[in-house]
Amino acid sequence: MAVTLDTIKAALGRNEHAPIYLIQGTDQYLLDQARMMFTNLIDPADQTLNLGQFDLSETPLSAALDDARAVPFFGEFRVVILDNAYFLTGENSKNKIEHNPDEMLEYLQHPEPQTILVIFAPYSKLDSRKKVVKQLKERTEYLAFGDLTERDIQKMIYSRLEKENFKIEKDALEELIRLTNMSLTQIMSELDKLSLYAADSKVIDLTAVEALVTRTLSENIFNLIENLLAGSLTKAVQLYHELVLSGEEPLRLHAALVGQFRLLIQVKSLQQSEQAIAGALKVHPYRVKLAKKTVRNFSFNALSKAYLGLVAMEEQLKSTQRDPELLFELFVLRYQHDIAG
């Protein structure tokens, strides 16, 4: 049965719990929050005996379930956590421990009443064709962290800051979300720095966000493309040099550039809502939102010339030993010539 983080937290607060929970999703912050809810149920002094944690990439499922069947020592219940339940996905089990899903199906039939079994599947999707996945979704408390919307992120930021008696200005909030590419894990990490900086005023402003927030590769790519399309070619070249100097692999950097230009061209050509485009292209709606803002100001010609130039540069990167930074400078010069012509 599908549940939310808040409903689980409320139930556990009332000392009500289910025998089995399935937690699925890729956001590390939310996964950590869920883990903390369950580990905190066991007093630290009793965790050695009444808290079991098993990494299924290293431990057979049978051994973990044997522990789940053990009765608690000096307590009302035990918590047993299974990490990396990759047998619930379509992932290849090569070089990993083979698990027998039937053992989980058997445990589902007769779960130990004094054990809270928590299964963590840190993956974007599970293989719903598998019987064990279908049964777990139907017969456990199933918490799935799907794609968070911008509004979801804003609520979590406001909620955290309110608990700490902080406020954040609207433009600072928007810039924080943009600079982190809406990564909740990074946002929560950046809030630690921002809160420390604003310890006296208790207000996080745009100046603090611009000065302190670490730029992601996505944000740097966004800035590089904006400079390129706007004709700020010196800035574009300088940023490319800085990224390479900081340790970014040229091929990875180039792949990100090509991928972003491909998205810009696709978004420019589709006259649909952000949600519809995101669904058609299988990307996060927030990426579509940013892309739409960018393509409003630039023509198909400017976007396609840049994309084709980068594709040609990719061939040279892979087939020659020429310096990537020199190749990028040559690409920029050709792009400038093509647009002027």
Image (cartoon, helix red, strand yellow):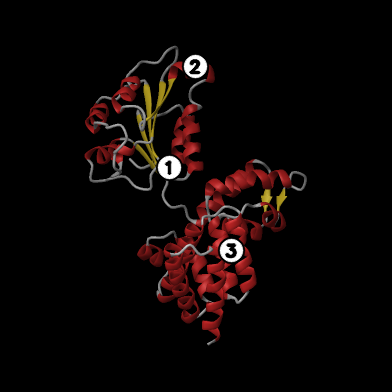
In front of the other: label 3 or label 2?
Answer: 3
Q: Nearer the viewer, residue 134 or 315?
A: 315
Residue 155, given in percent of the width and then of the height, sits at 55, 50
Label 1 crowd (10 A; few <14 / some 14-19 / many >=20)? few
* Chain-order first, disc 3 or disc 1: 1
Instruction: Please tell me which residue is depicted at 44% across the width and 33% down the height of the picture.
Output: 11
Q: Is residue 201 left or right of residue 56?
A: right
Q: Is residue 110 above or below residue 223?
A: above
Quadrant housing the N terminus: top left
Q: Mark 3 — residue?
A: 240
Q: Sequence order check: which comes first, mark 3 or mark 2?
A: 2
Secondary structure of residue under mark 1:
loop
Q: Which residue is at the front of the view, 275 or 155?
A: 275
Q: Is residue 237 above or below residue 135?
A: below
Please name the amino acid that badge 2 sits on.
Asp
- Name the residue furthest front: 321
Residue designated by label 2: 46
Q: Which mark is residue 4?
A: 1
Q: Compute the Cα span from label 1 to label 2.
A: 28 Å
User: Callout 3, which amino acid?
Assistant: Tyr
Q: Percent position (x, y) of residue 252?
A: 48, 57
Residue 67, quarter of picture = top left
Q: Residue at x 50, y 79 (%)?
A: 302
How far, Cα to Cα, is label 3 from label 1? 42 Å
Residue 178 lies in what quarter of the image?
Answer: bottom right
Front disc: 3 or 1: 3
